[in-house]
Amino acid sequence: MIQTRCNRLLNGDLEWLWASCTKLGRARQTRLAANPNTGKACTATQLDALAQKLARAGNFSKSSQAVCSDSTPSLGPHTLAKLQAKNPQGSVDFDKTFWPSAADMDALRQENDWRRVAEEQFSVDNIRKYFARSPLLSAQDADGWRRANMSLYCSARKMRNFTTSSESTWSCPSF
Amino acid sequence: MPFVLGDFFPGHSEEVAGGKYFALVKSNADGDAGGAFADADVRGIVIGSTWRRCSASRAVDESSLAVADYLLGQYDNFLQFAGQKDGATRCAQIVQLLLANHVDRDVSDPLVAVQLDASNTFCSVARQPQFDVLAGKASRPYDEGRVQVGDELPRPRTLDKYWGNFVSMQGHASTMRFSNNQGVTHHLPCSKGGQQGDGLETIRFVVTVHPSIGRVCERHLDCNVVGICDDIFIIARLSKAVSCAAEMKKILKADLDMDLNAPRFNVFFPDTSFSLDTARSALERAVREDPALADLAAMGAGV
């Protein structure tokens, strides 16, 4: 598959590539258009299966939540309008008179406190630990990544400035 | 590090500051799971980038102690527990502790706890006053002119190093992607307030509203005020508590464009000698006696 896509890219067949990458999404959209998601509550059997799946993956927090939580997704026809109403728009034309300048920020980053924070809190080791501790099956972000995906990514690439080797076997996000 | 430094290509900023958006039926609503109840309220949840949550988590880890010192020590009678481990529990315990001191029964002016209710707080707070606090200086008058342009505003200095993050997240409109029940994705702009997408956002919110609430508290030294994020409890004699609540409602609206929802304020009467009726009449009397409390006329549904 990778070879096929690379060949298509080299041949400039971008339309085919785009269609190939969005195939799953379009299929999902077609399915949902015919049968919209109503957010019906799961049956006890479904909840049981979900909770067990999460627990086996080591995500006990979500497993417990699956059993105890009574939150339901809002999937009605008015949800979009309600979300829009929840997000009133404001001006982003700010008065920046007293904002720190770029020079101020540069000076701040020369201070020992910032250097200590950058070296300790944001060290490669700490970032790796953060992802390594991440439970499986956590929420996907907008790009489809879960934190545990990053853990594999970090391990495979050894996290050396995020710029090493081509032999990595990091996993693609599951959409 | 780009999320800490705010170091992004400008064309990507809208996406970087946004995220995946979905909605839950709000627990106090009637239910809208199947779209049957069009008037049910929703709670919007944003899932930010995985890298954003990682850097925010590290930043919170680094700054939480200093921020907690600031939130608990800046004002004598206002404690904010947000951003701390078990903050909600500690907040509840302090409220209980303060309410335990109701032994000297004064039926005309009893000790109460007023729980303020803020509407859609995170998404509706004006950003300019928040940036003013983070920058440490007022760009416009606040607190009915008591704070003038150029005056210093209190803030925890430890957050200065995350200025780049704040500007990259709130310095422009962001885009949130919401997929509806038919799989169609909508792009919702967001140019006011922030989203509870990461821990640093919670800290930014409480730190930036802290001076506005704290200044009101300083004028009401008879009241003890305890907060956990946007849940604020005023513990005091009834007359003092409602007076503080009324001023806070006015100031927060003027300074931060933050709406406090008076009909949904809860008033707790710890003294068990009060029945629902006597508590209601005591509250109505307290509000009626002071013309400055007209804003709170609708208060009391949650006695």
Image (cartoon, coloured by chain):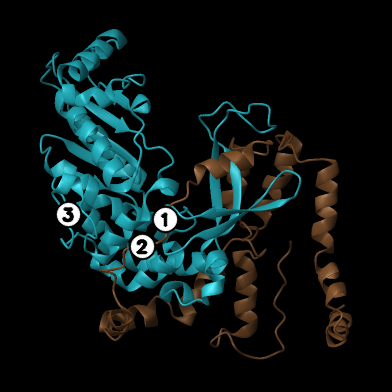
Chain colours: A brown, B cyan
Residue B175's x, y, as percent? 56, 59
- Left or right: residue A8 versus residue A114 is right
Question: Is label 1 or label 3 in front?
Answer: 1
Neighbourhood count class around disc 1 (C-alpha, 10 Å): few under 14, some 14–19, many 20 upward: few
- Left or right: residue B117 versus residue B19 is left
Q: Residue at x 53, y 77 (%)?
A: B9
Neighbourhood count class around disc 2 (C-alpha, 10 Å): few under 14, some 14–19, many 20 upward: some
Front-most of B281 and B55?
Answer: B281
Front-most of B237 and A50?
Answer: B237
Q: Residue at x 19, y 33 (%)?
A: B244
Height in image: A120 above or below B127?
A: below
Instruction: Provide the secondary structure element on which disc 1 rests.
Output: loop
Q: Residue at x 45, y 48 (%)?
A: B123
- Left or right: residue B290 versus residue A64 is left
Front-most of B74 and B14?
Answer: B14
Query: In which quadrant is the C terminus of chain B drawn?
Result: top left
| Residue identified by numbered label 2 | A94
